[in-house]
């Protein structure tokens, strides 16, 4: 039996494993590497805080994830294929490392985020 997501450290483990896949992925890696040109040293702590807020209720995230993705979409259209691959890799990583109530909630929140983000992007055009 795998542990559930319970701490910021668990979120760090999850996101570090996820990003190691994302950055090499043929479908979406270029968006992170070449379009957004993310700097892991600054980007990852923001992501840790975002998911810590979403999953553990710790109000550590300060930012606007929707606005960032709307701006990114102006540089490179984020398609259904991109979102499907992002979600597939995220779910796969969750399943490899964790199981339980919060791991399941992470998948539910991801479904909601995908829907909301795609809706906001489409309505901002």
Image: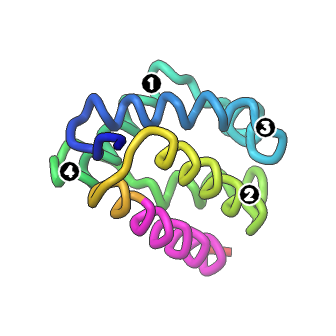
Answer left or right for 1 relative to 36: left
Disc number for residue 30 = 3
Mark 1–mark 3 Cα distance, whole angstroms, equals 18 Å
> Given the current orientation, which residue lies at the most extreme top position?
41
Answer left or right for 12 relative to 29: left
Q: Can you identify the residue that label 2 sits on?
A: 82
Q: Are the two marked residues, 2 and 1, in contact with CB atoms closer than 8 angstroms? A: no
Mark 1–mark 4 Cα distance, whole angstroms, equals 21 Å
Q: Are the two marked residues, 1 and 3, in contact with CB atoms closer than 8 angstroms? A: no
Question: For numbered disc 4, what is the local secondary structure?
Answer: helix
Tell me which residue sits at (52%, 23%) in the image: 40
Q: What stretch is highlighted in magenta?
A: 107-123
Q: Which of marks 4 and 3 is in front?
A: 4
Which quadrant would the N terminus be assigned to in this image?
top left
Q: Are the two marked residues, 4 and 3, in contact with CB atoms closer than 8 angstroms? A: no
Disc number for residue 42 = 1
């Amino acid at each position: 039996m795998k542990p559930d997501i319970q701490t910021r450290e668990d979120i760090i483990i999850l996101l570090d494993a996820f990003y190691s896949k994302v950055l090499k992925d043929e479908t979406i890696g270029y968006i992170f590497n070449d379009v957004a040109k993310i700097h892991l040293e600054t980007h990852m702590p923001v992501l840790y805080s975002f998911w810590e807020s979403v999953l553990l209720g710790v109000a550590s995230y300060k930012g606007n994830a929707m606005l960032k993705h709307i701006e990114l979409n102006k540089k490179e259209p984020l398609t259904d294929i991109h979102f499907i691959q992002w979600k597939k890799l995220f779910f796969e990583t969750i399943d490899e490392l964790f199981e339980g109530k919060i791991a399941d909630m992470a998948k539910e929140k991801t479904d909601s985020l995908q829907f909301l983000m795609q809706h906001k992007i489409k309505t901002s055009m």
